[in-house]
Image (cartoon, grey):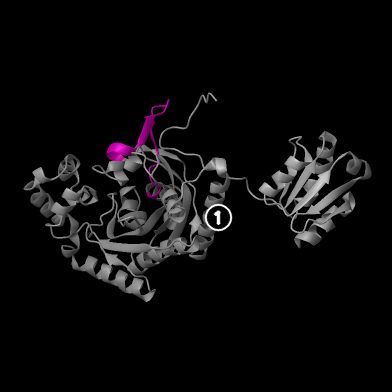
Amino acid sequence: MDIRYRRPRGTRDVLLEEMERWRWCEERWREVLERYGFGEIRTPLIEPTDLFTRAVGSGTDIVDKEMYSFETKGGEQITLRPEATASVVRAYLENGLTRQPGTLKFYYLGPMFRYDRPQAGRYRQFHQVGVEAIGSPSPVLDAEVIRTALALFEAVDAEGLTVQVNTIGCPECRPGYVAELQAWARGRAEGFCETCRARLEINPLRLFDCKVESCRDLLGGMRPISEAVCGACRDHHAALRTSLAAMDVGATEDPSLVRGLDYYTRTTFEISARQDLRQSALCGGGRYDGLVEQCGGPPTPAVGFSLGVERTLRHLYPEEFDPQLSRQSPVDVYMACLGQPAMIHALAHAELLRGVCRVEVDTTGRGVKAQMKGAHARGARLVLIAGDDELAAGKFQMKDLNDGHQREVAGDGLLAAVREVLGS
């Protein structure tokens, strides 16, 4: 077969049974998020490029290497959103929500775009579910947000997860540490990889994001930022740990956890799953008390996280999905039709049945045997057979696939007969 078009590298199709897995997770995630007081927000897939260059920050891989940016016909600089926090903050300000009292709690679920090297569980178009809680500086809210993330994993029966937390200070104490780190690293620049040497001059804290083992080993000689933060940040972090312990959330300290975005302050955290001998981050977030102000609003504290959908699904279902071995979504009633008039007859009655159950009308024109195989493949409980004789009498042959019992049912009594068997 000569396939003319193929999907772009780093993207994928989600279909058939795999789509059912996605929907199952999404439904449970929405239930959890609404129980925790979050309301859904949907922002555009495209945003002004400057929103991300300012919010995410120079020296980050997202801004320097991974954004899909372009100029519109009208001369606007536009970017496909690489993350959603900046978009939510922009929406919060643009829609005048600063006048809303208390803490505003949003959740989102949708695609993001980064020109990244495709690999298992990582794509150039990927999906995230995340939350943003805007309006409170309390470390207790940080703990609640972390607990919310764990509840999402619990809702889909994810196991083998660990929580790492850290504090990266605030604008009062972090600059001093960054200067110390920069001076320390410059004296050892030859030991770092090329990417780290560039980060050293632009954004030294990003050194801790490096995955190269030699760089990580070298950084082990630098005192962690958690030892350099001010008293207020230490108190905030201690209250976070106390709050997590009160909810029986076990978390380990990771002094290298700075996250890859510039807007974080104080709390950072990740939730990871062990794969083979390595930890794979499924979810990450933290506090970003300066972002709203940076985007033109008043000083406003906030905290949030994002969870990688593809990575989480891969953790839940590690086997490779083969669409050719998959099946369509199940139905309750399968209507086998012999000829076009029978299809029309079945379709008219299917509309009535669809008020109480899932119905498939077979319009392929195949023989009865092939259509019965189709009913089994779709997991149907009942098969309604319509041919010339049934059409003339205004009836159907109804077969229960559980016990093999078959009987004739009049069209005007079809709904009651189906409900009796299905118990609906």
Residue 298 spot, x, y in % from top left: 34, 54
- Residue 167, quarter of the rendered image: bottom left
Identify the magenta region: 63-85
Looking at the rendering, in which quadrant would you find the N terminus?
top right
Please name the residue shown 89% across and 38% down the image: 388
Left or right: residue 264 versus residue 341 is left
State the residue lying farthest toward the right: 393
Are there few (<14), some (14-19), or many (20+) residues within 10 Å of tag 1? few
Q: Can you identify the residue that label 1 sits on? A: 24
Position of 302 relative to 246 (above/below):
above
Residue 106 spot, x, y in % from top left: 46, 56
Left or right: residue 379 versus residue 326 is right
Q: Using the image as rendered, state which of residue 333 and residue 138 is in the foreground.
A: 333
- Residue 342, quarter of the rendered image: top right
Residue 302 spot, x, y in % from top left: 36, 58
Please name the residue shown 13% across and 52% down the image: 218
Could you tell me if residue 103 is visible in this image? no
